[in-house]
Image (cartoon, coloured by chain):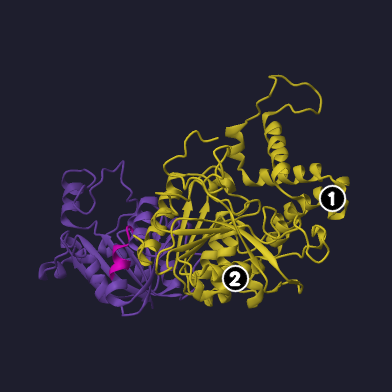
Amino acid sequence: MPEKIPADSVGLVEPKKLHFDEPLPLDCGRTLDEYDLVYETYGELNAARTNAVLVCHALSGDHHAAGYHSMADRKPGWWENCIGPGKPIDTRRFHVVCCNNLGGCKGSTGPNTINPRTGRHYGPDFPIVTVRDWVRSQARLADRLGIERWAAVVGGSLGGMQAMQWAIDFPERLAHAVVIAAAPRLSAQNIAFNEVARQAILSDPDFHEGRYYDHGVVPRRGLMLARMLGHITYLSDDAMRAKFGRELREGKLNFNFDVEFQVESYLRYQGRAFVERFDANTYLLMTKALDYFDPAADYGGSLAEAFRRARARFLVVSFTSDWRFSPARSREIVKALLDADRDVTYAEIEAHQGHDAFLMPIPRYVAAFGAYMERVAREVGAP
Amino acid sequence: MSLRPDLEIISGWIRRGARVLDLGCGDGTLLRHLHETRAVTGYGIEIDPDNVEACIRAGVNVIQTDLDAGLSDFDDDSFDYVVMTQTLQAVRHPARLIDEMLRVGREGIVTFPNFGHWRCRVQLGLQGRMPVVRTLPYQWYDTPNIHLCTIRDFEALCERRGIEVLQRAVVDHAHRSSLAMRLLPNLLAEIALYRIRRA
């Protein structure tokens, strides 16, 4: 709970919602006849409408990227460290837009909203959406907001994948793509982790084939397990050692299966907290969007070929201890951009925090990201 | 601000509109200059985070990576020129890196401090101390320069590895040249600049 809103925060913000009537064709072959997108904006759009930045969220993120919804909020938006006055995405210069992606669970049309055709929750009927589908829906949002061209499309992890897809699918509609802690596509190991997470949810007796809303329950155990597993992949071995070591909660071994090590307690807490704020069907969808992401597939398996369409300039950032999407994966993106003769800058940030580093105020990261965004601001006349 | 004279010489060697890779690009001065004056598309490689930030600020494409890890991310002949200024003496495997430069680039441009300069010879030969000179201002124990060579050494290496010298310039620390220096480069030049390619 902030006693007082910090000076470098965008402060109190309010989500907005837009309804879209025009059917959206999806990669799976189905169509969403109508849908809502919930989004937030920070900072003023300039008269020429050139200073808009689209922020794309990752697996468990949403439209609430910065600021507070009320003075009672315990925490600010998920990317408070990078969005706000004086921060890398400086809201004194940029007009920031962030929406909850389709299939999400924070107000945009998704499994936990009502299907107007049936009057019931979409649940498992919600189509499997892809990064490309999201980008298409975000382009429609841009149309409605009167934003012809983004100064930059920015995202970390799954958000970075959206930034790449934007550059490929709408080359004229963004000047810069900022791709942080991402990968050109998932490895077998990445997919394997996602599959275990999905199995945890799908095998929970409370899942009821995705219709748990009708039964007044949520697949708590499954979603909690999925999050615990995911969380391990977001942290590095070093970060876990530094944070928990082998510390015992009661200072001694109890020879039972209760929580004994601090790391167990932490994971369970993270899992439980996640169940309160996230929807299991959305988790399934988001992991599928990750698994399916492969922009090279449309271009004969060549990412460079895909990037040849792009006109944006790129900033690619990775973190040394990230083993989920390691620097080697970011270098694949960089290599493809070089092969395609695109402008690219690549920063490999020394950090021990693992994949989660992209959310943290690491000085070298903030400085490089900030310097790049300053240059973007200068170009669009928002110094 | 005027350009460092050695960079001025290098600029003169590079064709308009070329594609350039600058190894150890520092704060991006050369690439920025080449972009502005010769419409060159370029990328810099740099390991130091302060320099990477400076490049970003200058709007120069920079790839943060360790030169000692090689250039395996770059395809054969993917650049017109691969440039390396005052960095050769600081890498772990200079010969291997030169081979890599000439694999990735059609031509290479290399500059290095000449260890054969008379001041170096005097300090080592007469005083018996490791040279500390204007182009090599470090003490032996804190120097980043681990592979020093003379002009003759470098040319011998080129000879041995089938590398053709297309152009050479020799200058002093202020990047001036003279007739004497051109006649006795290994004794009088402080910095050597080469444009090379696979023979």
User: In the shown orientation, is residue B71 left or right of residue A183?
Assistant: left
Q: Quadrant of residue B99?
A: bottom left
Question: Which hue is chain B drawn in?
Answer: purple
Question: Which hue is chain A drawn in?
Answer: yellow
What residue appears at the point 34 percent right and 51 percent down from the top-left corner?
B146
Magenta segment includes B32: yes
The type of residue carrying mark 1 is Tyr
The type of residue carrying mark 2 is Arg
User: In the shown orientation, is residue A114 left or right of residue A171?
Assistant: right
Residue A323 visible within the image: yes
Q: Position of residue A80 (x, y in %)?
A: 51, 46
Q: Quadrant of residue B5?
A: bottom left
Within-10-Å neighbours for mark 1: few <14, some 14–19, many 20+: some
Magenta segment includes B156: no
Out of B83 and A305, give the one closest to the viewer: A305
Q: Position of residue A231 (x, y in %)?
A: 67, 44
Secondary structure of the residue carrying tag 1 is helix
Q: Which residue is mark 1?
A: A212
Q: Position of residue A108 (x, y in %)?
A: 67, 58
Cα separation, mark 1 vs mark 2, equals: 32 Å
**Chain of residue at mark 1:** A
Residue A160 is labelled as: none
Q: Identify the magenta region.
A: B26-33
Within-10-Å neighbours for mark 2: few <14, some 14–19, many 20+: some
Residue B75 visible within the image: no
What residue appears at the point 67 percent right and 63 percent down from the top-left corner?
A36
| B12 versus A320 height, above or below | below
Residue A140 is labelled as: 2
Out of A45 and B119, give the one closest to the viewer: A45
